[in-house]
Amino acid sequence: MATWRTPIQRELNIRLRDAVGEKTAVQFAKLGVHTVGDLVRHTPRRYLAGTQMSDFASLRVGDEVAVVAKVQSTRIRQGARQRVESLLTDGSGYLTVTLFAPKPHHATYWKSLLEVGSRGIFIGKVGVFNNSLQLTHPDFVMIDGRGQVTGKKERDKQKSAMRRTVQRSTMVGLYPATRALPTWVIAETLEMLLPSIVSMGDTLPPWVVDRAGVLPFGQALTEVHEPVDIEQAERGRDRLRFDEAFGMQLAMAQRRRALAHLVATPRPRVSGGLLDEFDARLPFELTQGQVSVSETVFTELADTRPMHRLLQGEVGAGKTVVALRAMLAVVDSGGQAVLLAPTEVLAKQHFTSITDLLGNLGDGQRLGAHENATAVTLLTGSLPAAAKREALNQIVSGEAGIVIGTHALLSDPVEFFDLGLVVIDEQHRFGVEQRAALAAKAERQPHTLVMTATPIPRSVAMTVFGDLEVSELRERPAKRAPVTTVFVDTFTNPHWVERAWQRIREEVGKGRQAFIVCPAISAKQTEGDVDAGSDMTAVTELLPQLAGGPLADLRLGMAHGKQPTAERDAAMADFAAGRLDVLVSTTVIEVGVDVPNASVMVVMDADRFGITQLHQLRGRIGRGEHEGLCLLLAAPGEGQENAQLRIRALELSDDGFELAERDMELRREGDVLGAAQSGSSSLKLLRVTEDADLIRDTKALADEILADPRAENDPLLDDLMTQAELVAAGEWLEKS
């Protein structure tokens, strides 16, 4: 639990249930609003002025909308249920409003409100009836030419809230809302809480507010939630965006300052050791990028200043080889290196690939090992007790120069002989505290190399990894074969699915292998970051269908995250050894799986995945001499244009960095910095693609502010950094 030094931050971090009650707080939680601070930063997605008319051309079926429109006609229709039908117009198009009356006097009253020529604000979900757009039972209030509410006050509590909101505001803010928590209730809740927040002063020292040239915090909240015009609302939002960017960069700057005072044991490269022997045995030539990044790493390892470097690269660009060369350099200088992976599957894959690359250089002191050989030890949570004791002994004695493992490495019993280098794979799956916990197991600050197989846009890297120097590997090894990606639209061409199975049979007939990837394990279970849905293709259901149908005589296996570890590992081992023709799996094969003989991949329900995840998946094929074919099967219908754009992006490009930028553009409103844990605030307004300039400016400003003597032990700045660290403790990147 964070300890706050200032009243304003204590107030902002009050849990919402303590401020508005459990029932209302439960509804706010569905919007990601958990604290008072979350609520005041929950800003309108747009504003309405009563004097403006909406444009119906932008309306789409299924959208939750709010429109300002004029009544063209109104009539009462009789039937099983009496109803009022009103035709609205924006001046060129039309929209029907339908209200079902429980009693005759309701219909009469509604008809009197919806007079021809009158104007109103209507909010509801767009539906369709008789090929015409309609709103069924929308919330509405009628307004005059000045945007003021007309007519009698209704008894309905929700409409009363709506009426009060419109009455008191020049501009009506429309908040991200739910059916159970409409925008009017959100506005009333804010009206209740805002005065006390505004009266408590600023979250920043006055001299920082002046230096940054932003609005005072209280004024910004007032202008966002009760603006006179759009320009005023934007000024308020600018201050809130600044707070998020500056808080994050201030925390990053503080980390950089703290790291600058730490001392690491230098690990200079040693001639004639393991590294030189490993390089001499490599069966391929390193790319220029691998050589360049390695030289940078070797230089930093030889320094007393701890290396803190992020290595991000294209799929198959050879990050593991760069990391292994760094680990060997540390072992040559008498230290140990540890590689932390997020899952047992990935840890075991790293262990296998590294021991294969090393050969007898990784045999330790066993008979037949190379004279400079070191032991490579694997430590995971599922190891039997005896094997775990042996691994722990090898680690603490220094016999194991290279240690590979999962979160089990963070537990108390793990002690290192001389930890010199920490390599963290798939960094976005670990929190900052976990990285620090592993580094704390070294006597002196170890060097740190963070790797990610998901290329990160520069604006994200600057925000998320602001305490790290960044290296990129864009060049693929020459041996990689090209991969052709094809979108198979099963919505308009369902018969093309059979052709996908035929292509698998053709490739297997040539002696090659295939992946089939599904978003779900079963009808009720999904893997990773895919949203649940009963209509998704599931591994456990598809495999028997294929085995008894289009792939009947092929050797099929299955892999997913809920299998017993031994069973899943056996399936992957059989596939890697060629004992299986087809592996039907979830995204457990997303990274680390290297089967050069696999030449085709079929991704089911490809619209359920993000761009970078699809790029990672197709990186599992074309890893040998055979050209790859990736078939993305999806049925995105009307209203799923975004899904189609994601899939088309994969067809047009195989550049992971370019695709990462495109992914960010398409996910614009996603919380790319992750969901906060334990109810702490996450970023609300900052968009790393759109606000790159702001992020860059606040990075420079944060360094300047911390260098100012006035920042020393300032409670407001301390609290701001604490808030930023709470965000950082969550899962930094949304797996795309």
Image (cartoon, helix red, strand yellow):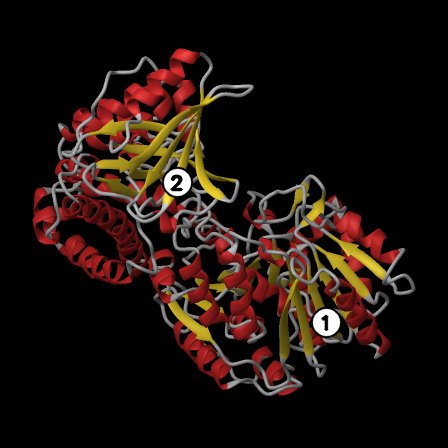
Specify which label sits upstream in the sequence, 2 or 1: 2
Q: Residue 656 versus residue 349: which sits nearer the camera?
A: 656
Secondary structure of residue under mark 2: strand
Q: Quadrant of the N terminus?
A: top left
Q: Amino acid at mark 2?
A: Leu
Q: Residue 77 versus residue 316: which sits nearer the camera?
A: 77
Q: Residue 722 versus residue 589: which sits nearer the camera?
A: 589
Residue drawn 54% across the image and 67% down it: 648
Please state which of the two labelled residues, at mark 2 or mark 1, is closer to the viewer.
2
Residue drawn 43% across the image and 12% down it: 104
The residue singled out by tag 2 in the image is 95
Residue drawn 64% across the image and 65% down it: 592
Q: Is residue 169 above or below residue 206?
A: above
User: Residue 650 in the image: x percent, y percent?
Assistant: 55, 69
Answer left or right for 72 relative to 361. Answer: left
Other-residue count near label 2 (Cα within 10 Å), few / some / many at <14 / 14–19 / ≥20: many
The residue singled out by tag 1 in the image is 600
Tell me, yes or no, if residue 328 can be seen here.
no
